[in-house]
Amino acid sequence: MLPSLTNMASRLRLKQLRLLIALDEFGSLHKAAEVVNITQPGATKALHEIESTLGAVLFERTNKGLEPNDLGRCVIRYARLIHTDLAHLREEMIGIMQGHGGRLSVGVIMGAVPALVESLSRLRAKQPELSVEIVEDTSARLLNLLDQGRLDLAICRTSVSQRPAAYDCRSQEQEPLLLVANPEHPFAERSDLTLSELSKCRWVVFPVNMPMRLTLEREFREAGLSFPAYSIETSSTFTTMSLLQQDNNLVALMPVDVAQSALRHGMLVGLPLELNSRNEPYEIVTRRGIELTVLTELLIEELTHSAG
């Protein structure tokens, strides 16, 4: 039976977590003990204390040494997260004490990447010692990370959440969309197209229930057409670009700002079809009731300036 959270928090020590990480890296109590700067008997005792605290065996002895089992890999993963969080804490404290620098963790959906990059460029010009972590993902996953406190802010959509009132939102931005394809696509030279013609193409689309997928589904539904069959689903910008460049017959719907670079360099072309549907605006999102750091406020100012 697993112990309570209070019991785990009171008995686990940071040095023990460092030992777990070292054991995962070296598979040897002797080498792990050297890294953590304790004796091998001390390491053996510490591992026993960890397993006793958690009420579970974490490692199996093999001819290759100690190897973590499923529970062990789970605990080690969180030990690494805690260690990383401490490093980030120290980095941010140094920035505060020195009056400059610091650290930001920002989540962003694909369509908002250009706006974020532009805003961060201006902020880093003013704060050259600023460290930034950028996580590009879907709105649902970004909101989950925001809930966990792993992001300072996210640029995404709160409509995908079951509790949108848990967030403060600023600066709604429309996300213009464009149909794109390989320059060798059969429709690349066309001056006009219909959705009916495009429905027969092979598509790269966003996964089910994502806002851009819903926009495309609505477009086909209102035109009385079936959604394209045998599509490839991905939320990755890089994957979408790679697929379009590899396959001359694919088409995809992308945010205009994201597609611009590929269009300028001739890697993609825009197809002449204007959508009747509009994609849902994205927002600058923070957790409600949480006091924002100075750096978060500064980034919000830059993002708002960019939107204006």
Image (cartoon, rainbow, N blue to C red):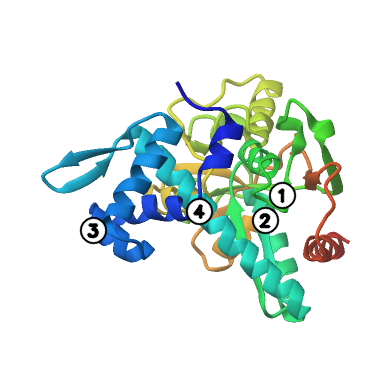
The C terminus, quarter of image: bottom right
Q: First in sequence: mark 3 or mark 2?
A: 3
For the residues labelled 4 and 1, the Cα–Cα distance comes to 30 Å
Three-letter amino acid code of the residue under disc 1? Ala
For the residues labelled 3 and 2, the Cα–Cα distance comes to 40 Å
| Residue bearing mark 2 | 106
Q: Nearer the viewer, mark 1 or mark 3?
A: 3
Three-letter amino acid code of the residue under disc 4? Leu
Image mark for residue 14: 4
Q: Residue at position x 54%, y 32% from top?
A: 207
Three-letter amino acid code of the residue under disc 3? His
Q: Is residue 120 above or below residue 58?
A: below
Q: Is residue 255 visible?
A: no
- Determine whether the residue tagged by mark 4 lies in a helix, strand or loop: helix
- Determine whether the residue tagged by mark 3 lies in a helix, strand or loop: helix
- Residue 129's image quarter? bottom right
In the rendered structure, the answer to whether residue 107 lies left or right of residue 153 reads left
Outermost residue, left side: 63
Q: First in sequence: mark 4 or mark 3?
A: 4
Q: Position of residue 72 (x, y in %)?
A: 36, 38
Three-letter amino acid code of the residue under disc 2? Val
Q: Residue at position x 82%, y 66% from top?
A: 298
| Residue bearing mark 1 | 154
Q: First in sequence: mark 4 or mark 1?
A: 4
Callout 1 crowding tier (Cα within 10 Å): few <14, some 14–19, many ≥20: many
**Is the C-beta separation of discs 4 and 2 under 8 Å?**
no
Q: Is residue 201 visible?
A: yes
Callout 4 crowding tier (Cα within 10 Å): few <14, some 14–19, many ≥20: few
Q: Nearer the viewer, mark 4 or mark 1?
A: 4
Image mark for residue 30: 3
Q: Residue at position x 51%, y 65% from top?
A: 266
